[in-house]
Image (spheres, rainbow, N blue to C red):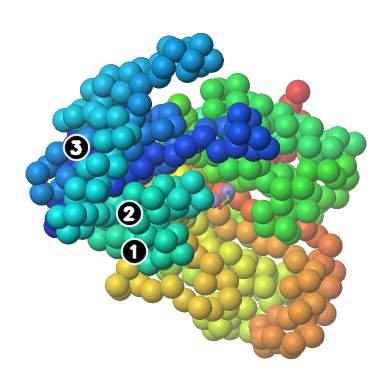
Amino acid sequence: MFIKSFYSDRRKALVKEMKTGLILLPGNEDSPMNYRANTYHFRQDSSFLYFFGADRPGLAGIIDIDENRHMLFGDDDDLSDIIWMGTRHSISELGDMAGVDRTHSIAELEKIIRQGRDKGRKIHFLPPYRAERMMKLEALLDIHHSGIMKQVSVELIKAVAKLRSVKSKDEIAEIEKAVDIAEKMHTTAMKMAQPGIYEREIAGRIEGISLSHGNPVSFPVILSIDGQTLHNHYHGNLLKPGRIMVTDAGSETDLHYASDITRSVPVGGKFGEEQKDIYNIVLKSLEKSVMSIKPGIPYRDIHLKAASVIAGGLKELGIMKGNIDEAVTDGAHALFFPHGLGHMLGLDVHDMEDLGEDFVGYDDEIKRSDQFGLAFLRLGKRLQENFVLTVEPGIYFIPALIDKWKSDKVLTEYINYDKLEAYRNFGGIRIEDDVLVTATGSRVLGPRIPKTVEDIEETMSLP
Ligand code: GLY
Ligand code: MN
Ligand code: MN
């Protein structure tokens, strides 16, 4: 855990953002995989971690806004728990480490919530994303689970998103540690990307690197020579010359801060000319985006700038045509770049996505577009100093999408469908870095992870 004042200061800041009532922040529970005692790897809820730090199942926190009282709930281990799991911190030790006023048993949680409800006090809670949480809320609040999402506290969501979006220097240092691990994962993947090896051998190795540094990956590894499938978790292909291997993978630190890095490399270690052309467009798009990031600029504008670089590059290759500004305004680039430029990064790889993407990435000024492509941008609002976000442009040739647009004659003024045929089996390329918004611009977090054609080819030539 961080030092206790971090947690008490965060809770104090949260109280300042709220008007009245009780804030209920349940932690996560163990979740069975295939029978009760065989559970998924435990992952604590990120907002609970942010405000209380304690990293084990069976806990909950309450913050009484009106009395500024902070309470941690949980049951101490009994002898049987100690036999199976060893000696762990007591609840009062965990409470002390988080700087709370009082600790209580879980039975007390129900009482305090009931008393609050009896007095007509507002109970604020965040949107649940697990069935166990839904059922816990149903029991505590006497709201049928079908009605829970309608009663989440928008005031609390906005307050939590506001606080968690701006990272402290210690949080940034944690994210950089996670990028350090990602660097080892990605350079290993690059060196292994030789013909005759299965994707699963590489995916397994890099997942093991994350585990060997103490924690699982921050999201299931995406690694494929079919990089045109954006989130490809199938790892059964044999690597073949002529394909690009896309690896999108990151790790978590002990405190659960995430990294999220993508690299795209040629199987065998040498880019072909056509691959180099497409790769360098994506790289230019990434570099221009990173250079344009600064406080006050809407990330939607950076996304559109990245899209312009992609459309301009594809025009030079004859795949797109016409006026590039108009092509981007009309969304023609989305045939090749159908996702958003990036998202917030922190305790979650898509930070705070459980709170609702629009509360995190949009605001009263900048609303989400419904245009294909731009609609998938998770972060559109103006950037602030100490936001951490991903920048992840890509170019993909997705045969099913190409065929649909071609047969529907979509945006034929900007797309040279005949020329495009030569690329339909190209695959895809994405490059992703984790970026801090600084006072005057931006900084790519972590060590240099090979990114230029020359750096990648050199790294892949090393043992
Ligand atoms: N790792 C998934 C993403 O880049 O958003
Ligand atoms: Mn990623
Ligand atoms: Mn990402």
Residue at left offset 86%, top offset 35%: 197
Quadrant in the picture for residue 54: top left
Residue occupying image coordinates x 57% and y 71%:
373
| Visible residue check, residue 357 | no
Out of 73 and 20, give the one closest to the viewer: 73
Asked if residue 61 lies left or right of residue 400, the reply is left
Label 3: how many Cα within 10 Å (few below 14, some 14–19, many 20+) = many
The percent coordinates of residue 161 (x first, y second) are 32, 54
Q: CA separation, marks 2 and 1? A: 10 Å
Q: Position of residue 227 (x, y in %)?
A: 73, 54
Task: Tell me residue 230's x, y (percent).
Answer: 67, 57
Specify which label sits upstream in the sequence, 3 or 1.
3
The reply to whether the C-beta atoms of the residues labelled 2 and 1 are less than 8 Å apart is: yes
Q: Residues within 10 Å of mark 1 (few under 14, many from 20)?
A: few
Residue 70 has which mark? 3
Outermost residue, left direction?
Answer: 67
The image's mark for residue 141 is 2
Q: Amino acid at mark 2?
A: Leu
Mark 3 vs mark 2: give the one in front: 2
> How many numbered callouts?
3
Does residue 391 appear in the picture of this structure?
Answer: yes
